[in-house]
Amino acid sequence: MKWDICVKGYLKLIEEGCPEELRPTFCQHCHSRAKLHKHGKYKRAIITLKRLQEITIFRFRCPFCHKTCSVLPSFLRHNHIAALDVQEQVTLRRLQGTSLRKISEQLPAQLAFSEKTLWRWKKYWEKRLDGLRSAFWPIVLAHCPHLLLPRGSEVPGGSWAWFFWVWNKTWRQWTDKPVGAFQWLVFLSPPMAATAGG
């Protein structure tokens, strides 16, 4: 699935059922390149910055190993109800110096996540960004070779600050869709967890 699909775009894509473009091109379990068969669907609640809503997730079955996998849209993590835009906003608040405890206390009712949950998000995304460390600048400069880097007091402090600076300066060159930086991060970085069965 395209990395830069947003919730609105996904809902439009699946209006008439599961489109062929969602079908995986290989089995995540046995790595067979055989055509995976449609194997049902299920409803899943997600929380975005704007609302709680329900989306449909489609499942596929391998004709060789008979195992199934779910195809998640790029704005979701496996087994997480919070969309990536929510997790991204928590990270941005942390960059501004707000503690996880304070962020947890200040979240609106529909985004009621514990400090422990926010800490787990923090550790996951730090690991994800760290996994991209050696490839980040070659990828960015390959797409944006004329990017002017900041100097002096404008230089971002730390990996996250640099990541968001690049996203804010170059996102229009990556996509014209209303997606967040964390979707881009997942697209750029190596996989960390399988989404099989979920």
Image (tube, helix red, strand yellow):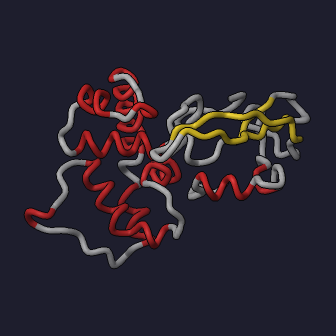
Instruction: Give the residue at the far bottom of this rendering.
Output: 146
Looking at this view, is 153 or 19 the one in front?
A: 19
Q: Position of residue 42 (x, y in %)?
A: 76, 33
Q: Is residue 109 left or right of residue 164?
A: right
Q: How far across and how far down the image is residue 127, in percent? A: 39, 36
* Rendering coords of residue 161 (x, y %): 25, 52
| Image coordinates for residue 3, horizontal then vertical, percent | 58, 55
- As drawn, the residue found furthest toward the left would be 153
Q: Identify whether 4 is placed above or below 33.
A: below
Give left or right: position of 17 versus 7. Answer: right
Seen at 76% across and 53% down, the residue is 14
Quarter of image, res 102: top left
**Residue 62 shown left or right of residue 164 in the figure:** right
Q: In which quarter of the image is residue 80?
A: top right
Residue at figure coordinates x 86%, y 35% from the top left: 39
Quadrant where the C terminus lies? top right
Name the quadrant containing residue 56: top right
